Amino acid sequence: MLQRVHDILWGMPAVALLSAFGLWFSHKSRFRQITRLPAIVRGCVKELKKSEKGSHSAAASMATALGGTVGIGSITGVGIALETGGAGSVFWMWITGLLGCMLKYAETAAAVAGRDCSASPPCGGAMYALRAAGKSRAAAFFAVTCVAASFGTGCLTQSGAIADAAAETGVDARLTGAIAAACVLAAIWGGRRAMVRAAEFAVPAAGLIYLLAVSAVIIAGAGELPRVFGEIFGSAFGIRQAAGGISGAAFTAAVRTGVTRGVFSSECGMGSSPIAHASNPSSKPGTQGDWGILEVYADIFVFSTLTALAMLCCGTCSAYEVFARLPFGIGGIIFTPLLAVFGCAAAVSWCFYSETCLEFLFHSAKAPKVLYRLCAAACVYLGAVADTRAVWNAADILNLLMALPNLYLLFIYRKEICLCFTRVSRPQKTAFRPG
């Protein structure tokens, strides 16, 4: 039943809707994510150097956002995409990432412009921007669905992937779930500031080690790369399927799976990671939007792509088997701890998003936040012992429900967002007026 609901919601209409928004903002920005990429990198590096260090810095906000995007979706999620949609799903994941860059820019700019700066760190996101536009019901719906999505995308899927990896080494799933739940609870109990510090510490170090490991596997199997790229492009357009007499269903599966996994991994259009970007008090809508573009590049075109290439070179959909190719058995030693760091960092980042939503819904009340932290830890444990496929389907469904009010926000603010394309180097408004 859950699989059927998933397939209906994530059909071609949902794919077309997300693609249309990404294409529209890409067109209006003259494909800024491509034509202005060197300038975007220089601008973000310059801002990083001059920003203050600490839990409110540009680096801390980016690390929190990356903690939610670069993780299980870029590792286990890629394996699921290859298994379900074939190698062609990688191509459509790239297309999703390319168009998603401007979706991320748009939702980040709107979140920063509509945030509440009276809190420390500032509270922002689609819910605040929607309320500023007079759409209180849509704002509340987004906040509620974000909290619900955090249990699926942020807790259940993360611990499930960690438990699967630990099971390869003989560790019981219940023990893995208990340890992961304890680590997440310890990281989130101190509130939003503690969550940012945890993400800023864990994500960069684990990311560097992971990239070095998968790059080593790809270099070792470099002779397979021509075959791998041929398989990606051939399967993406149904050429290989047609040659083998397979129906167009395989092509549709590649498109749907690539887009679904791309959205899950990068969170483009969902409105989640802009909540972290909005916590940087010195950020401006346009410049922080550029940070969103780099976030998508890091997730889709670096982590997810290298993971996919390594898997295809090795002829497997299992990240554990990829790491097993590393010499001296080092891969089997570091894989589970790395995945645990990524999974817990993602869970912590999603808890940050949810606590911001709870701040929006209940203001400074402590009871809802305490209850949420306990429920989040419980979901981390349950994810380790639940059925993996059902958990991923539930997470995808919640992601789409969360995206709907966020896309409505982008439609409302479409004209103001487009003005940011020409205002990045000049003082910008702190709030939008819906056009």
Image (cartoon, grey):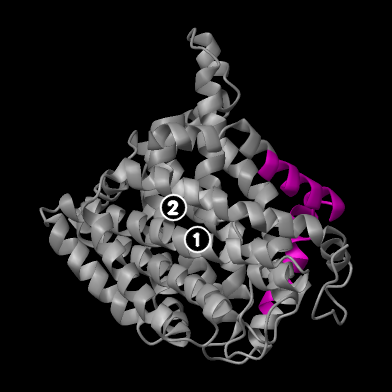
Quarter the C terminus occupies: bottom right
Q: Please determine whether, in this image, residue 71 is positioned above or below residue 253.
A: below
Q: Residues within 10 Å of mark 2 (few under 14, many from 20)?
A: many
The vertical placement of 25 against 369, above or below, is: above
User: Mark 2 near mark 1, Cβ–Cβ under 8 Å?
Assistant: yes
Foreground pick, 229 / 171:
171
* Magenta stretch: helix, strand or loop mostly: helix
Q: Quadrant of residue 286?
A: bottom right
Above or below residue 388? Residue 430 is below
Does residue 229 show up?
A: no
Q: Position of residue 370 (x, y in %)?
A: 36, 81
Q: Residue furthest front?
A: 137
241 on left or right of 406: left
Asked if residue 229 lies left or right of residue 290, the reply is left
What residue range appears in magenta?
A: 17-45
**Magenta segment: does it hold 111?**
no
Three-letter code for the amino acid on which mark 1 is drawn: Thr
Q: In the depicted view, which residue is nearer to us: 147 or 380?
A: 147
Q: Residue at the spot x=24%, y=48% of the render?
A: 324
Nearest the eye: 122 or 211: 122
Q: Which residue is denoted by mark 1 in the rendering?
A: 69
Residue 315 position within the rendered picture, expressed as x and y whole percent measured from the top left:
34, 33
Horizontal and vertical percent for residue 382? 25, 58
Q: Quadrant of the N terminus?
A: top left
- The residue that mark 2 highlights is 73
